[in-house]
Structures are given as structure tokens and as C-alpha cells.
Amino acid sequence: MNNNNQPIGIFDSGIGGTSIWKAIHQLLPNEKTIYLADSKNAPYGQKSKEEIVVLSMKNTEFLLEMNCKLIVVACNTATTNAIQELRAKYNVPFIGIEPAIKPAVTHSKTQIIGILATQGTLNSELFNKTTEKYQDTKIIEQVGHGLVQLIENGGINSPEMAQLLHSYLNPMIEANIDCLVLGCSHYPYLIPQIKKILPDHIQIIDSGEAVAKQTQNILRDKVGFSSAENNQPIFFTNTNPKVLNEILGNKFKVEEKYF
């Protein structure tokens, strides 16, 4: 495969997909990345499938205008509701992010796992097709109402966040889960708080590493790696960039752009 110095495009309904961006950037530091946070329309999880498809197409077209060679849909809700439509319409490889049900089922000894996700993900046809494969495992689903909004508003360590997490996780603990799947790219930022609630034996599983490895595979097999070095990532948001800056440690340029 020839070298390809075009950027990798990544989009999410807000800042949460930066958890996916970090995994990609860590594995592929020579790749230029452009991250798009559609925070103005977050959360996607409460929108209709039609709305999610329209927003995902808008985000894709923004990244294609930036000459991206590959697009990572760093949003579970957008993946489960819109990735088939995106692949049908645009001539560029797409990598999606789905709740990591398979590794959770593989690791579980109790055959009882929990999944914390948005309404849009849990209601999607793709998610339901995935869970149907694991009839022998009890899957306890919990909608994370309010979590994305709190993260987007800088409330990761707020009392409201702790209260919501307790109300969502305690019933799963009582049900004897031994794996918790984080089914939203925002939720890895809650792992420190979640660990305070969960017993030590419950494993927390998210999709970041798997998405980064799949990105590497697509670059190797279809698109080409960048031969450039020290490519500075670019971040765009359509709301106040303060929270996005903070989640990135104020290390990178964040551009406010109304798209």
C-alpha cells in the first residue's frame, strides 16, 4: 500500500469521541487527525433515526471537504443508526463503534453482563441483532439518561453525576454482573467515578482500543499510512470550546466553527 498523507476524520455528537481519538492517536501517532464535535446537537441518543442519519451525513461531508481518507464514526448512536447509510452514499471507508458485547460475553463467568448506553443505541436494529447472538448470556440494559449532557457541560465530577451513576449501576451490581460495557464514547471519561461504585471483580469494557486497531488495519489494507511526522491534530466544535479544551488538557488547537 502506498503512503497516504491525507488526514483521518473522526466525528462524534460531542466531546466523548475524543476517548476514541486518544486511542487512535496513541497507536498511530504519525497520522494527521481531524476531530469534529457536533456538541450543539448532543446528545444524539434521544433523536430519531432520521435525524441521526442527517446529522451524520452533515458531519461526513464536513470531513470530506477537509480531504479525509477515512472516517471514524466515534459515536455508538451514530454507528448503530446511520453507518449503513453512510457507507452506501460516500466512497470512503467508515469505521464504526459498537458496544463491546462480544468481549464482555467472552470474559463473563456469571454470564450476566451490564450495558450502559444511550436510548438510541439500545433501540437500534444493529444493537438488537448483535445481542440476539448471545442468548445464553443475560444482558442488563440501562439507558444513561443525563450522562452525556453532564459531560458536555463539564459536570464529570459533579454530585449529580455521582447520583445518576449510583442509580444506574447499583441494580446491575445486585443482578450479579461481572462485566460492564460502556456503550457510549462519552462514558470512558466516567471510569474513575464508576470504579468507586463497582466492586473490584467487575470488569469495565469499552471500544477504544478495538477501534484504533481496526483503523490501523484499514490503513494497512486499503488506504495507506501517512509518511509524515509530528502531524498536529485539529479539533472543531460548534459550541464553546472550553470543555473540549479541558478534556484534551489544553494541549491542542480547538477551532469553533458553526456547521
Image (cartoon, helix red, strand yellow):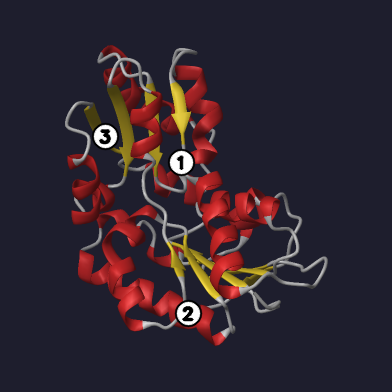
> Tag 2 or tag 3, which sits nearer the N-term?
3
* Residue that carries the numbered disc 1 in the rendered image: 187
Query: In the rendered image of this protein, does residue 65 appear above or below residue 157?
Result: below
Mark drawn on residue 118: none
Q: Residues within 10 Å of mark 3 (few under 14, many from 20)?
A: some
In this view of the protein, can residue 35 be seen by the observer? no
Question: What amino acid type is highlighted by mark number 1?
Answer: Tyr
Query: In the rendered image of this protein, does residue 22 appear above or below residue 111?
Result: below
CA distance separating discs 2 and 1: 25 Å
> Tag 3 or tag 1, which sits nearer the N-term?
3
Question: What amino acid type is highlighted by mark number 3?
Answer: Gln
* Residue that carries the numbered disc 2 in the rendered image: 259
CA distance separating discs 1 and 3: 13 Å
In the image, 195 versus 156, the foreground residue is: 195
Position in image of residue 69 (x %, y %): 57, 77
Q: Looking at this rendering, what residue extends furthest in the bottom direction?
A: 65
* Residue that carries the numbered disc 3 in the rendered image: 142
- Quadrant where the N terminus sits is bottom right
Q: Give the residue displayed 33% in from the left and 16% down from the top.
A: 173
| Element on which disc 3 rests | strand
Q: Give the residue displayed 52% in from the left and 78% down from the top.
A: 63
Question: What amino acid type is highlighted by mark number 2?
Answer: Phe
Query: In the rendered image of this protein, does residue 23 appear above or below residue 95?
Result: above
In the image, 161 versus 128, the foreground residue is: 128
Q: Give the residue displayed 43% in from the left and 66% down from the top.
A: 40
